[in-house]
Amino acid sequence: MASRTMMAAFMATALWSPPLHAQLIVHKDLSLAAALTIATTAAERCSTQGYKVAVAVVGRDGQILVHLRGDGAPPHAIENSYRRAFTALTYRRPSAAVEQRVRKDSGDMLVLLTHIMPAQGGLPIMLDGDALGAVAVSGSPGGATDEACAQAGLDAAAALLK
């Protein structure tokens, strides 16, 4: 009899307890204020150096939060900035590192993935090992300059990313 009572108690507990996998996932997201600070600072940095660029900031899901096209930026810059940001987010490393990987292994199939652009200029936005999003710049005469402008945007928003 005691074993039946224990079994009934166990079954009742199991039936009315929420499953472990039903817990909510808690994470931080990039705010619009932080994304705007990053994008405008990156664009201004390149503009003061005489470069006409586009800047993209994407959130953790790869969707565009802010996309700026500076006056006179080339037509391809808007798409390239998005694709570089998407690449940096996807691989959680600078898009330049992905570019180096592809250069070492020309048969690497990652270049066939949609929106991937292994070219310098994109940086992930990281907080405690978690990718909140990414920023990328396109349009200056060289990926190193694009990346430096993107880094200036990240530096300007550092206080907002805590």
Image (spheres, helix red, strand yellow):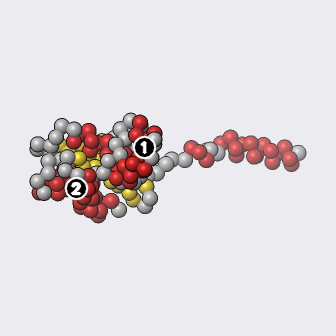
Q: In which quarter of the image is the N terminus?
A: top right
Residue 81 badge: none
- What amino acid does circle 2 point to? Thr
* Residue 99 seen in this snapshot: yes
Residue at the image position 45 percent from the left and 42 percent from the top: 108
Q: Earlier in the sequence, mark 1 or mark 2?
A: 1
Q: Where is residue 143 in the image (x, y as percent from the top left)?
A: 26, 52
Looking at the image, how many numbered discs can be counted on the residues? Answer: 2
Please identify the quadrant where the C terminus is shown.
Answer: bottom left
Residue 35 seen from this side:
no
Which residue matches tag 1? 106
Amino acid found under the numbered disc labelled 1: Ser
Q: In this view, does 157 lie above or below 87?
A: below
Nearest to viewer (mark 1 / mark 2): 1
Q: Mark 2 points at which residue?
A: 145
Q: Which residue is drawn at 19% across and 50% down?
A: 141
